[in-house]
Image (cartoon, rainbow, N blue to C red):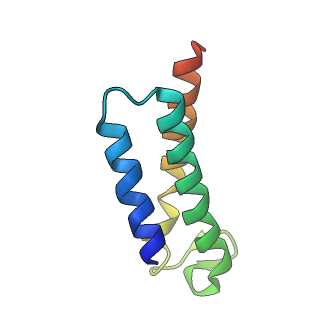
Amino acid sequence: MRLLAGTEIAVAAALLIPRVSGRSAGASLSALSLGLLGLYARSPAMHDGIRPTDEGIAVAKDVWLLGIGAALILDDMGL
């Protein structure tokens, strides 16, 4: 959990630094999101099938981070 928190802080800092490319920021945000969604998938108390339980709602919303990361990558590529 400490590693995940440290990674989250590092990604947030990278998103705020103007010299970091959109591709790098998007890739790191996507990787963080996939890690969080993996945690969600491996924790049966967080979901009932695919639907999140009350405990899993806070983590299930991280799918938006994956979309934002993909958008940053595609924007940097000019697509």
Q: Position of residue 35 (x, y in %)?
A: 59, 63
Residue lying at the far top of the rendered structure: 78
Looking at the image, residue 43 sits to the left or right of residue 54; the answer is right
Q: Position of residue 31 (x, y in %)?
A: 59, 51
Question: Between 63 and 54, which is closer to the camera in this rendering?
Answer: 63
Q: Is residue 50 above or below residue 7?
A: below
Question: Between 58 and 78, which is closer to the camera in this rendering?
Answer: 78
Asked which quadrant contains residue 49, the reply is: bottom right
Looking at the image, residue 29 sits to the left or right of residue 40; the answer is left
Question: Between 6 and 26, which is closer to the camera in this rendering?
Answer: 6
Q: How many marks?
A: 0
Q: Tell me what residue is drawn at x 54 percent, y 65 percent.
A: 36
Q: Tell me what residue is drawn at x 60 percent, y 14 percent.
A: 79
Q: Position of residue 52 (x, y in %)?
A: 55, 72
Q: Tell me what residue is drawn at x 64 percent, y 67 percent.
A: 38
Q: Tell me what residue is drawn at x 49 percent, y 57 percent.
A: 62
Q: Position of residue 2 (x, y in %)?
A: 42, 76
Residue lying at the far front of the rendered structure: 19
Question: Between 18 and 58, which is closer to the camera in this rendering?
Answer: 18
